[in-house]
Amino acid sequence: MTNVLDGNAVGDRIREELRGCIDTLDGEGVTPGLATVLMSEDPASETYVSMKQRACEDLGIESIHREIDPDAPAEELFETVESLNDDPEVHGILVQMPVPDHVDKRTVLRSIDPEKDVDGFHPENVGRLVAGDARFKPCTPHGIQKLLEAADVDTEGKEAVVVGRSDIVGKPMANLLIQKAPGGNATTTVCHSRTDDLGAKTREADIVVAAAGYPELVDGSMIAEGATVIDVGVNRVDADNEKGYELVGDVEFESAKERAEVITPVPGGVGPMTITMLLYNTVKAAGIQADVPVDLP
Ligand code: NDP
């Protein structure tokens, strides 16, 4: 029987455990606060931000929201981030990507106070992650680590293949897998669009993490018998239904499930974990800034 991991259930368990941390902070008069900044009218970005706000409110995290006209000068965004950096009620800041073309994304990431950078994308936090001294692990790869742990998938000594080398998923995932630490110690290969014969690489893997943003790129023939398959992809493809589309992952679920021992579905696998780990990082940030020790799950 293939173990189909339930990201909602694992995420809910971690969120329940975070409530205990929030109670500890509350006892010291601290309410964790997450600020979301949106400079876009893209419906998907609006949806992501409102999902994050709702998740905060459900857990008792204060949600602060700033919207900036996408045509406004970049300076307006930087001033907003600066005021949030200075606001003691705000412990975490998230600027929803993508920002408009006239705003330099790297400058945005650098403008956030590293102690409030709950996405973990500021170069200081990236450096700390690589050096094995992470402050905030990026939410999606951290969520995957937690999913693997919940499913008792030991990464130590395993062959792992990460498909994708983005700064938000592929690279930090590979960095976590190679750390000399629990959830790491895997022999890790990173594949990308220039990789020759992707299937030859993935077939060698005990653990495949697919984060390419390419619908059903990895099928059953590319998976070793008994492998663990983590599907990060969320792709909209045309479908003959009311909405006119459906969401599929980067893995062809049905054929991969025939061979995998452990697999994540889309939706309901990695997605809920990403938001959970954002809440986790916000609670952690509040503990650091208020100097209150919290026992994180
Ligand atoms: P990016 O587009 O930033 O990166 C995609 C990576 O995949 C690139 O490194 C690219 O290679 C590589 N790639 C693309 N096509 C192929 C291919 N045919 N073979 C091998 N490698 C390929 O995407 P993200 O990392 O931001 O996201 C990946 C997917 O995960 C998307 O579907 C996204 O929606 C989803 N996602 C889901 C989250 C969740 O919580 N569930 C969170 C974040 C992302 P190259 O570098 O050479 O271009």
Image (tube, rainbow, N blue to C red):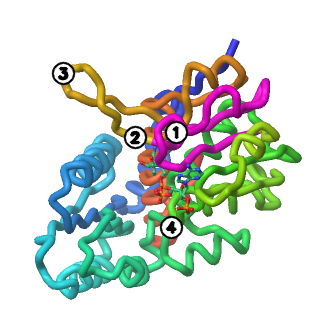
Tag nearer the camera, 4 or 3 = 3
Mark 1 or mark 4: whose residue is earlier in sequence: 4
Residue tagged 1: 250
Some atom of ligand 1 lies within 8 Å of the CB belonging to the residue at label 1: yes
Q: First in sequence, mark 2 or 4: give its number.
A: 4
Q: Quadrant of the N terminus?
A: top right
Q: Mark 2 or 4, which is nearer the eye?
A: 2
Q: Residue 242 shows which numbered tag?
A: 3
Mark 1 or mark 2: whose residue is earlier in sequence? 2
Q: Amino acid at mark 4?
A: Gly
**Type of amino acid under label 1:** Asp
Please give the residue where the numbered disc 2 appears in the rendered image: 235
How busy is the neighbourhood of tag 3: few (under 14 within 10 Å), some, or many (20 plus)?
A: few
Left or right, 76 with respect to 45, comes to: left
Q: Nearer the viewer, mark 1 or mark 4?
A: 1
Query: Between 237 and 139, which is closer to the camera in this rendering?
Result: 237
The residue lying furthest to the front in this view is 196
Amino acid at dot 2:
Asn
User: What's drawn in magenta, residue-wise?
Assistant: 207-233
Q: Mark 4 — residue?
A: 120
- Picture coordinates of residue 234 (x, y %)? 42, 41
Q: Nearer the viewer, residue 270 or 247?
A: 247
